[in-house]
Amino acid sequence: MKQPTICPKFEKAISLLSQRWSALVIYQLLSGSQRFTEIQSAIGISGKVLSDRLKDLEHQGVVKREVIPETPVIIEYSLTEKGRSLEPVLREIESWSQHWVKPEPELS
């Protein structure tokens, strides 16, 4: 019996969401535009990794970077239409995790 072929678009979408921290960055931005430090403190990610993820998500058309010309310059990140369209997917994963994922025991 021939194995069904996985849709290349599906595989690419899963790859985007499964890249370390990407889904959490997108999830954090569902609440609206945020500055770099707000995202960083909310999810506990290093500055270098967050910078890399934001650049990649911007390149993928999921995140938009906006420079606000004030003194000092303010940079805010928000989701594009493509990024916002992931909300029902992420909310469903959140719901699934609440039901099925057990918290890991604390190490003493």
Image (spheres, rainbow, N blue to C red):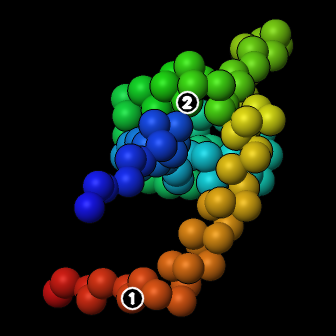
Task: Tell me where residue 2 sits by quadrant.
Answer: bottom left
Front residue (pair 57, 72):
57
Secondary structure of the residue carrying numbered label 1: loop
At horizontal 63% and vertical 61% (from top left) the residue drawn is 90
| Label placed on residue 102 | 1
SS category of the residue bearing label 2:
helix
With respect to residue 81, does 52 lie above or below? Answer: above
Q: Residue at x 55, y 30 (%)?
A: 57
In front: 88, or 49? 88
Q: Nearer the viewer, residue 102 or 106?
A: 102
What residue lies at 19% left-to-right and 84% top-to-bottom?
Answer: 107
89 with respect to 49 (left or right): right
Q: What's the distance in space between the residues labelled 1 and 2, CA to CA?
A: 29 Å
- Residue extending farthest front: 1
The quarter of the displayed image where residue 72 is located: top right
**Residue 86 picture location, percent across and down:** 68, 50
Q: Residue 17, position in %: x, y? A: 49, 47
Dot 2 amino acid type? Leu
Q: Is residue 50 visible?
A: no
- Judge the density around disc 2: few (<14), some (14-19), many (≥20) Cα neighbours within 10 Å: many
In the rendered image, which residue does mark 2 sit on?
57
Give the residue drawn at x 37%, y 34%.
49
Dot placed on the residue nearer the N-terminal end, 1 or 2? 2
- Tell me the quarter of the image containing the C terminus: bottom left
The quarter in which the N terminus is drawn is bottom left
Could one spot residue 91 in this view of the protein? yes
Residue 34, given in percent of the width and then of the height, sits at: 71, 39
- Amino acid type, mark 1: Lys
Q: In the image, residue 52 lies at what x, y percent?
A: 42, 27
Vertical placement of 86 versus 72: above or below? Answer: below
Foreground pick, 84 / 104? 84
